[in-house]
Amino acid sequence: MSSKTAVVAGQPGLSKKFNPVINQSTSDDETPLAWPNRPERFGDPLSPVEAAQYLRLDELGTHTPRSAIRTLKFWRDRGELRATKYARHVWYRKEELDRFLAKKTEPPI
C-alpha cells in the first residue's frame, strides 16, 4: 500500500497523507479526518478511533475522530479509562470500555 503526500496550503512543514485504504486524507499522525464506516463487529483490542465508535462518540455529531481521541485521552489522564500501550500505539480493550460505561452509568433512583 502506498500513500501520497501533499503539502497543506499556507502551512509550511505541515503535510497531509492520502490513505487509499480508508480513502480519506489524514494528518501526519494517521488520524482520519472523517469518521470511517462503523464496523459490524468490533475486534479486540480497539484502536482509539474504533474505541470512540464503540462508545458512540461518532453518533453525537459533536466529535471528529481527532477530538474523540482527545476525549479518550482526557478520561485516561483522569484515571477513569485505562488503555493498553504496545507497539508504540494506544489500544483499548472492550472489557475496559464496558467497565468505563458501567462506571459512568447513573445509579437507579
Image: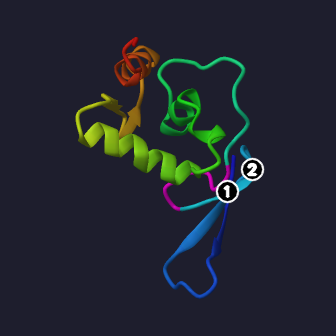
| Disc 1 packing (10 Å; few <14; some 14–19; many ≥20) | few
28 is higher (above) or lower (below) than 72: below
Give the residue displayed 30% in from the left and 28% down from the top: 82
| Disc 2 packing (10 Å; few <14; some 14–19; many ≥20) | few
**What x and y, as percent, mark residue 57?**
56, 38
In this picture, residue 74 sits left or right of residue 45:
left
Q: Main secondary structure of the magenta part?
A: loop
**Residue type indicated by callout 2:** Pro
109 is higher (above) or lower (below) than 84: above
Which secondary structure, mark 1? loop
Question: Is residue 69 on the magenta stretch?
Answer: no
**Residue type indicated by callout 1:** Ser
In this picture, residue 88 sits left or right of residue 98:
left
In the orientation shown, which residue stands out farthest toward the bottom?
Answer: 10
Which secondary structure, mark 2? loop
Q: Please say if the residues under marks 1 and 2 sit with CB atoms less than 8 Å apart.
A: yes
In the orientation shown, which residue stands out farthest toward the front?
Answer: 109
102 is higher (above) or lower (below) than 90: above
**What x and y, as percent, mark residue 75?**
33, 39
Residue to which mark 1 is pinned: 3
**What x and y, as percent, mark residue 2?**
69, 52
Residue in front for this viewpoint, 27 or 49: 49
Which residues lie in the magenta part?
28-34
Question: How far apart in space, not on screen, are marks 1 and 2 (Cα)?
Answer: 7 Å
**What x and y, as percent, mark residue 27?**
56, 61
Give the residue displayed 69% in from the left and 41% down from the top: 36
Give the quadrant of residue 83: top left
Which comes sooner in the sequence, label 1 or label 2? Answer: 1
Question: Is residue 30 on the magenta stretch?
Answer: yes
Disc number at residue 97?
A: none
Residue to which mark 2 is pinned: 20
